[in-house]
Amino acid sequence: MSDKNKAEEVNEPILDGETVNDSGNEQEEVVNEQEVQSVEEQLQGELAKEKDKFLRLFAEFENYKKRTSRERMDLFKTAGQEVIVSLLPVLDDFERALKELSKSEDKEMFKGVELINGKFRDVLKSKGMEEVGVKQGDSFDAEIHDAITQIPAPDKKLKGKIIDVVERGYKLGDKIIRHPKVVVGN
């Protein structure tokens, strides 16, 4: 075999009878590998940024869904608030009517009005309305109660306490729709 055939088998080019050193090709390969690695690192960095962006966007969307769902539930709870507030004077009238009818001799009419009042209260209760529990002797709380007047306390124990409840208060869910009107001892 000739020198050229041997060089082709070994893949070493021969120039003018001498073998060329392969170190130049090795350096190029190392540089190419470094470039590939730096491009790969760049792509990994960009991928990490995009993943982070996606996760943040996903979390923001989940928070949005939860918030709108919560707002929708609150809206359903208080959707009939305006109607219920407008019916509260009718409820007060029923209480006054029952008070007056209890004084009369017509017990059948009293029972009839009492049944209607009970049914009316049950309907309002089924819609989420509850009475704010206030009674004589409770401590006055400006957050809950509406003081319409102050009078001298008949007893020292009633000073700063509720002496009389003039108008009942009601709440719809957790929200007070009408504060109880009370008289406070001074």
Image: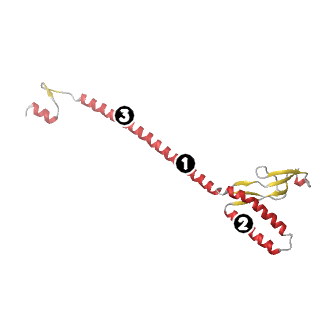
- Identify the residue at image location x=66%, y=57%: 80
Where is residue 111, by image quadrant?
A: bottom right
**Color style of the picture:** secondary structure
Q: Residues within 10 Å of mark 3 (few under 14, many from 20)?
A: few
> Marks 2/1: CA distance?
39 Å
Q: Do we see residue 4 in this rendering? A: yes
Give the amino acid type for the residue marked by disc 3 in the picture.
Answer: Ser
Label 2: few (<14), some (14–19) or many (≥20) C-alpha neighbours in 10 Å: some
- Say which residue label 3 marks: 38
Residue 99: where, in percent of width, then height? 83, 66
Quarter of image, res 46 = top left
Q: Can residue 173 be seen here? A: no
Q: Which mark is residue 64?
A: 1
In three-dimensional space, the C-alpha distance between marks 1 and 3, rounded to whole angstroms, equals 39 Å
Q: Quadrant of residue 178?
A: bottom right
Amino acid type, mark 1: Tyr
Which tag, 2 or 1, sits closer to the chain's start?
1
- The residue to which callout 2 is attached is 120
Point out the tag, 2 or 3, that comes first from the N-terminus. 3
